[in-house]
Image (spheres, rainbow, N blue to C red):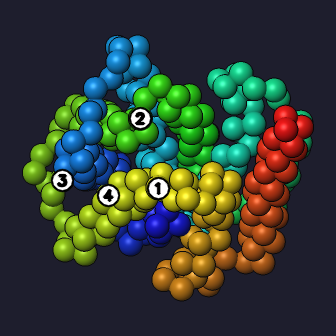
Amino acid sequence: MWGFTGILGKLIALDAFIIVWHRVLIAFIALGLFLLFRKKSIRISNWQSGLKLIGVGIIVTLHWITFYKSIQLSTASLGILCLSTTTLHVTWLEPFVMKRPFQVSEFLLGFIVIFGIYFVSSDFQPHEYEALGYGLISALCAALFSVFNAKLAQEIPTPTITLYEMGTGFIFLSIILLFQGKLTSDLFIMTTSDFLWLLFLGILCTSFAFLITIEIVKVLGAFTVSLSINLEPIYTILLAIFILQEHTLLNNRFYIGATLIILVVIANGWMKNYQRRSKLKNLS
């Protein structure tokens, strides 16, 4: 489902900003109804945590806007490939936020990812460089909210975190649209196809995918799930080939660079698992 989000950036004929506005609104309503049905509390213990959730909610929203902007300027494959650089940013963010030791191996893998991006983009057109810029900004935002959410999850239930962040995103974007004079009924003028894809994006690819991932982690473990999520670029590129026919737009350099980046992402996952197992073995 997460691999499908990039495809929807092409299938939905709306501006990236408007897509995200609808996405956070639908996800907020769907998740709110779910928590209400399950009679889950959504109270935040203190105002400091509330401010942190607002900040991260804005970062999540900016991540999605720049992600879809990148896709609409180029291809879904390029947008999701840029998102693979999230791992690089996490390597230098986690030591500061989570207070864990700096991993030289992760930093070196990050540089290999940069080389892969350079290899892919060496013969880009001007508009593709703009798409690359948006994609890399999106990856930075993804790393920021991933690390901050990991920190917040130590004190706040994860469904509550997502609910508040979706609500924050909706209010944040609505304020911008209000000042632009665009917060009107025109936002709901769209084709039936766009409306159905937006429901799919907001309910299944956002709220449901998030909630079901929590349940899957309990059964399969965090490593198996995180490795599957790291394979998101493969899912998106394959879907883009079959649904959007993007193979006619991409050259061999793209696939070589993409393969390099994806292998680094997988290698990083296996390295973390090996380090975790070694640590547990030493403790036992």
Residue 157, numbered circle: 2
Quarter holding residue 49: top left
User: With 106 as the anchor, is 215 left or right in this view?
Assistant: left
SS under mark 4: helix
223, 196: nearer the viewer:
223
Mark 3 touches mark 4? (CB < 8 Å): no
Sequence-wise, the earlier of marks 3 and 4 is 3
Sequence-wise, the earlier of marks 3 and 2 is 2
* Pair 1/4: label in front: 1
In the rendered image, which residue does mark 3 sit on? 187
User: With 120 as the anchor, is 1 left or right in this view?
Assistant: left
* Pair 3/4: label in front: 4
Sequence-wise, the earlier of marks 4 and 2 is 2
What amino acid does circle 3 point to? Leu
Mark 4 touches mark 2? (CB < 8 Å): no
Q: Give the quadrant of the C terminus.
A: top right
Label 4, label 2: how many angstroms apart (C-alpha)?
20 Å
SS under mark 3: helix
In the rendered image, which residue does mark 1 sit on? 215
Q: List the single residue furthest toward the left.
A: 185
180, 153: nearer the viewer:
153
Mark 3 touches mark 1? (CB < 8 Å): no
Q: Locate residue 14, reporting x and y percent.
A: 31, 61
